[in-house]
Image (spheres, helix red, strand yellow):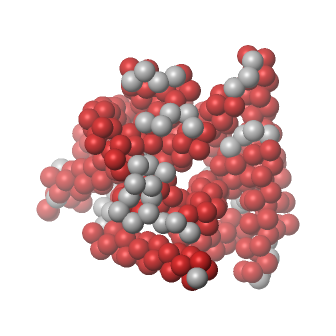
Amino acid sequence: MRDSLFLIELGGVVLLLAILSRIALRFGFSPIPLYLLAGLAFGQGGVVPLVTADEFIAAGAEIGLILLLFSLGLEYSARELVDALRSNAFAGGVDLLANFVPGFAAGVLLGWGVVPAVFLGGITYISSSGVIARTLDDLGWMGNRETPIVLAILVMEDLVMAGFLPLVTLLQVGGGATKVVLSVGVAALLVVVVLAVAARYGPDISRAVFSRSDEALLFGILAVLLLTAGATEALNISAAVGAFLAGIAFSGPAADRARSLLVPLRSVFAGTFFLFFGFQVDPGTIPEALPAAAALALVGGLTKVFTGWLAARRAGIGPRGRIRAAVGLIARGEFSIVIAGIALASGAEPDLGPLAAVYVLLLAIAGPVLARVVDRRVVSGPTRAAAIGRG
């Protein structure tokens, strides 16, 4: 009886994710907010709490997190990350200060400790690469002059995350100053070593894993991914960082095939990850978190607008392009939830979960909506092609 109930619950969850994905596709926005809302409905304190499939979904969520970060790493080579760091240091620095500081300050004002405040700073800092890339593609902005600036800022944020995640993981473990400094040094050394190895031996690694058989290639990729994630976890560094670094190490045909093979798998488990995050948040705590989350979302939207506008202006982009870059960075999504999920798992601050959930819900919706408004109002009608040409 228990086995049948488990299968029925799991089947219901998968069906729900399929329906929500179709709804999001129909209306042209990211399904992340819908997955979060579903998690709130079926988690602790929800309308219909799951009782038998929750452990399986928790394991699926962990795999989803690893696949998300691995897929992100596949998008960049070590050389591209180094070049992005060199050429976009100013825009990346402005982005970090303008968007991390408000979240950290809010955590301090709410009376949280330093570590939860650092987590909240990370949540407010990083934009959603997935939501933004989809929005740019849907609106036909990929060929615009400002789009490389937006993408460069996203790359910088991803690179910062490679250092941020191990840092907060170590901070929450605690210990003396010497232990923390030593652990941070080990984490930084690991990142540098992996980037250097990927730059030098990435093609060799890819050739060793590559196979004409999809089955053999997929098993090989998953083996490298899970072993790397597990090894970094054993060093008290987030498995997500290991997955990101493993993705960077792949290049050439192996990386190209990995993207196509992993997209369906990543989508399924990533949906499970966002759903499980919602499970961990008690819906009864949402009303209390709403005022602070709404205020923080307003500030977070404005700071991203400032970041995009300034970066585009510094690159010599015209007024229309600056506006598009400004609204293009607003959306928060998957990686804000990744950070919040790590914080919740560590028990850093109970109020962080509902605050992060509402914050991401607001900005994951507001970002694409504002981009569409700008697309209609700023670049519309017969002037559209000319406006894109002028930037």
Q: Give me the residue at 30% from left, 47% from top.
A: 362
Q: Give me the residue at 48% from left, 48% from top.
A: 337
Residue 274 % position (x, y): 48, 58
Q: Would residue 147 be found to the left or right of residue 207 on screen?
A: left
Residue 22 % position (x, y): 36, 75
Q: Give me the residue at 79% from left, 65% from top.
A: 223
Residue 78 % position (x, y): 69, 47
* Residue at the farthest front position: 1
Quarter placement of the N terminus: bottom right
Q: Would residue 266 be found to the left or right of residue 49 on screen?
A: right
- The answer to whether residue 6 shows anywhere in this view is yes
Q: In this view, does 95 lie above or below 344?
A: above
User: Who is closer to the viewer here, 192 or 77?
Assistant: 192
Q: Would residue 290 be found to the left or right of residue 342 on screen?
A: left
- The answer to whether residue 154 shows anywhere in this view is no
Image-quadrant location for residue 261: bottom right
